[in-house]
């Protein structure tokens, strides 16, 4: 794992967008894993700008989102289908059949989850998976005690997550769907590269637990410590409770792979 700290949330998001753009230029048939959440919005805005102004080409790219609420139809503006359409899909040239999200309206959820895994495999696996980290320590909707080898499945949301996401449901945690379909921690760990973006002072404690704390199911993001190619990009505010920041800054300043990103 590597940790990259940028001065502001804007610059952290811009760096993540550049990592995606460079991966897509290197491999036009990139299979890209996508995350929702406010943290990711500036990343998608920057990718849309790169498409518009620098012709970043998504026409051969395939995407798989991490999760979707159970019981929300794709037309519901609060569904992750709709959120992704608004944030990214309608702004870039992704093909109509190239974007995938779990089916929150499936009548047979277990089969829908198995089919989702099958579709990821059929596309050759995820090349680059974007991730946020929730206040509960989740990646996707893998709430505390999610098995570190879990696959795409139905998951009950924790009270912490219901409270965190209430802002999208009129501020009332009781109106947030109680269950979701999410890629499992094991599914996420199979992506060839993971890029997590964590910004804001409210994420400082959970980021420190995820990156420097013990590996454990109570913080599913800590499983990223097992991943052979994972970078966590944060702003100064989210990095404020990390203890190894001198080393992380030194690595970013000196490692050859980061030289092209110094001004990002
Ligand atoms: C939701 C998503 C997660 C995401 C989290 C972070 O719960 N299911 O995948 O990581 O939000 O949210 P935010 O970026 O708004 O803090």
Image (cartoon, rainbow, N blue to C red):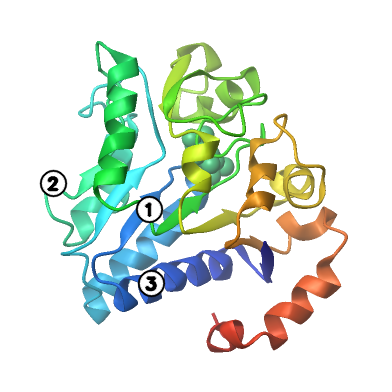
Q: Residue at x 20, y 28 (%)?
A: 75
Residue 127 sits above or below residue 217 on the image: below
State yes or no: discs 1 and 2 in contact (Cβ < 8 Å): no
Pair 1/2: label in front: 1
Residue located beneath label 1 in the image: 126
Which quadrant is the C terminus positioned in? bottom right
Relative to the observer, which residue lies in front, 223 or 155?
A: 223
Quarter that holds the N terminus: bottom right
Residue at 18% x, 57% y is: 94
Crowding at dot 2, Cα within 10 Å, few <14 / some 14-19 / many 20+, comes out as: few
Q: Quadrant of residue 78?
A: top left
Name the one closer to the observer, 216 or 209.
Answer: 216
Task: Tell how many labels.
Answer: 3
Q: Where does the image place residue 55, in percent across and percent down from the top left?
A: 21, 77
Counting residues from the start of the chain, the first of labels 1 and 2 encountered is: 2
Residue for badge 2: 97
Q: CA distance from mark 1 to mark 3?
A: 12 Å
Q: Mark 3 highlights which residue?
A: 23
Question: Residue at point 84% right, 53% down?
Answer: 241
Residue lying at 57% horizontally and 83% vertically, measured from the top left = 257
Outermost residue to the right: 243
Q: Can I make out residue 218 in this image? A: yes
Percent coordinates x, y for residue 39 in the rendering: 52, 50
Residue 41 in the image, given as x and y percentages of width and height: 43, 53
Mark 3 or mark 1, which is nearer the start of the sequence? 3
Secondary structure beneath disc 1? loop
Q: Tell me, yes or no, if residue 71 can be seen here.
A: no
Q: Tell me the crowding category of disc 3: few under 14, some 14 to 19, or many 20 or more residues within 10 angstroms, Cα based.
A: some
- Could you classify mark 1 by the number of other residues whose Cα lies within 10 Å: few (under 14), some (14-19), or many (20 or more)? many
Relative to 88, say whether 64 is above or below.
above
Disc 1 under 8 Å from ligand 1? The reply is no
């Amino acid at each position: 794992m590597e940790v990259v700290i940028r001065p502001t949330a804007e610059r952290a998001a811009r760096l993540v967008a550049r990592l995606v753009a460079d991966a897509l230029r290197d491999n036009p048939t990139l299979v890209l894993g996508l995350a929702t959440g406010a943290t990711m919005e500036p990343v998608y805005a920057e990718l849309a700008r790169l498409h518009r102004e620098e012709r970043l080409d998504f026409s051969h790219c395939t995407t798989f989102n991490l999760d979707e609420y159970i019981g929300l139809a794709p037309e519901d503006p609060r569904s992750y289908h709709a959120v992704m359409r608004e944030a990214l899909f309608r702004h870039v040239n992704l093909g109509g059949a190239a974007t995938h999200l779990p089916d929150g309206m499936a009548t047979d959820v277990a089969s829908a989850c198995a089919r989702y895994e099958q579709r990821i495999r059929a596309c050759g696996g995820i090349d680059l998976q974007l991730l946020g980290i929730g206040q509960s320590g989740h990646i996707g909707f893998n709430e505390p005690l999610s098995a570190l080898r879990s696959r795409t499945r139905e998951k009950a949301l924790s009270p912490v997550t219901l409270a965190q996401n209430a802002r999208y449901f009129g501020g009332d945690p009781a109106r947030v769907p109680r269950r979701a379909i999410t890629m499992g921690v094991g599914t996420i760990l199979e992506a060839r590269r993971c890029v997590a973006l964590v910004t804001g002072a409210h994420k400082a404690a959970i980021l420190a637990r995820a990156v420097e704390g013990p590996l454990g199911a109570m913080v599913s993001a800590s499983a990223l410590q097992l991943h052979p190619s994972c970078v966590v990009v944060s702003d100064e505010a989210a990095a404020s409770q990390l203890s190894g920041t001198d080393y992380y800054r030194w690595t970013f300043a000196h490692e050859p792979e980061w030289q092209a990103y110094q001004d990002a």
